[in-house]
Image (spheres, rainbow, N blue to C red):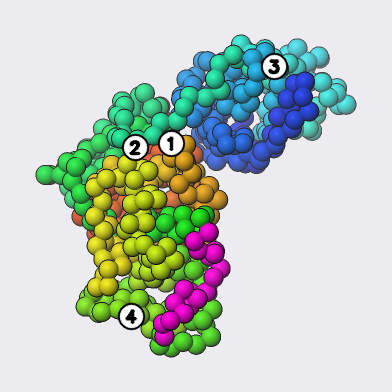
Amino acid sequence: MARGGMRPSKELAASLRVGPSTERRSAKLSAKQSRGYGERKIASGQKTALATLALSARASVTCQKQRVNHARVHRGESLAKHLALAFLGGPEGEEREIRWNWESWPTRCAPTTVDPRRGPGGLPGPKSTALPEVSDSTLAPAVVAAPGETPVATVTVRVPGVTPAVPPYWPTQGWRTSTPAEQGMNAERLALMMDSVRQQNLDLHSLLVIRDGAIVSETYFGSNTPETRREIYSVTKSFIATLVGVAIDKGIIAGVERPVGDFFPDRKFANWDAAKQAMTLENLLTMTTGLDWPEADATFQQLHGGRDWVKFVMDEPMRSQPGAEFNYCSGCSHVLSAIIQRQTGMNTRDFAQRELFEPLGINDAVWDTDTTGIAIGGCGLQLTPRDMAKLGYLYLNGGMWDGRQIVSTGWVKTATQKHTGTDTDLGYGYQWWIYPRWGAYAALGRYGQTIFVIPDLNLIVLTTAALEGPDPIFDLIEQYIVPAVQLS
């Protein structure tokens, strides 16, 4: 429940009516409940804001935190003004009305929780549709409801005469740093996290917490530094998936429905039955190929000792129909790299340099290749921690980077949604692991290499490590990092 008042509904419908014009825009708003806050990711056109709104016991709406293109608006400032900045823009002086509905607890429909200006007991008559109007400087748009009806809040705003948003920040030339408090995080909680790391003797190489595009916590362990470049193992897969998306956006690859065999018309693979012929690019992306691939060190040793890695993977027999089951397959990610190279006419590494690394300011990447020169798709990429984090920031911004759409917003959305279940609590997208608890997604590599993205909190957690698995990282995120946001 929001502090001191009602809980926002899980699904909200919002409509924005523009004053003298007839323009109408609508968006469905989804509120995620998390430790007492209703967090709504609200989109209008290409602008996105994260608003945390809490309804107080006096039925006033207060601005707890709201971001307008990463510029924080602190509690106590004009909600109406910043709703205008976030969602509307437009000429100075133009009036627009914002209305939204939410479910309320039945006990909150009592007269004491609505605007006392609204007649006897504070409630309008059963047929009343009148809604109070509130000026730009007011923090308390009234909430009204006839008996049995859903409460409605309304606020009329006069658009301030300023630019609608602060320009986004892009860490192309380097990340900015900030105190946790400046980015709405609790420094004490993050300090407790570091105490826990030391107490558990976790074998971390680096741990970065990034919020609103600023590094709020950055620690390197042992001899590691910000310039230390390390193998990121299977985090490579998320870079490969991004390059597939870029190739599809550019029309170089027709789409994810295309059969894998179509990309290799000159090749012959063993066990070429109807099931294998039906395998698509999307099956490679989602690890649902149906191949009887054993993900084990012994397999990797055979793969690395072979002359033709693509044939080694594609010769595997089928154990199920494509799409029927999840079977983690690093070899399948290498086939994706081979497809990128075939379709672009460039080495995957060179394609990445032109389309991804150079725009993001990643200048120190090293990418191992197989025996035929194909960049290894399942692992093999070496980056610094700060450069790794740029992929998370790219996805956090819908594929946009400094005015250029690197990969389409549609691809980002599709790649980071659950396409299949796994043998863990996580789902799987297009070479991204899906963490449902906070609507998060992660690039996970062996030994604890992690890019963990929580869009609703505008948060990225980055680790390089030598751990047995990702669970200690997840524990740090759950016990310390997310609460550090919620306690601020």
Estimate the spatial distance between the alpha carbons at disc 4 and disc 3, rounded to whole Å: 65 Å
In the image, residue 244 above or below residue 213: below
Estimate the spatial distance between the alpha carbons at disc 1 and disc 4, rounded to whole Å: 41 Å
Q: Which numbered disc covers residue 94?
A: 3
Q: Which residue is mark 2?
A: 172
Q: How many C-alpha atoms fall within 10 Å of the one at disc 1: few (<14), some, or many (≥20)?
A: some
Image point (36%, 54%), residue name? 352
Q: Which residue is mark 4?
A: 312
Which numbered disc, 1 or 4, marks the residue closer to the eye?
Answer: 1
SS class, disc 4: helix
Which numbered disc, 3 or 1, marks the residue closer to the eye?
Answer: 1
Majority secondary structure in the magenta region: loop
In the image, residue 52 above or below residue 319: above
Q: Is 151 situated left or right of 170 in this image?
A: right
Estimate the spatial distance between the alpha carbons at disc 2 and disc 3, rounded to whole Å: 37 Å
Marked residue nearer the N-terminal end (2 or 3): 3
Where is residue 218, by image quadrant? Answer: top left
Q: Is 133 situated left or right of 216 in this image?
A: right
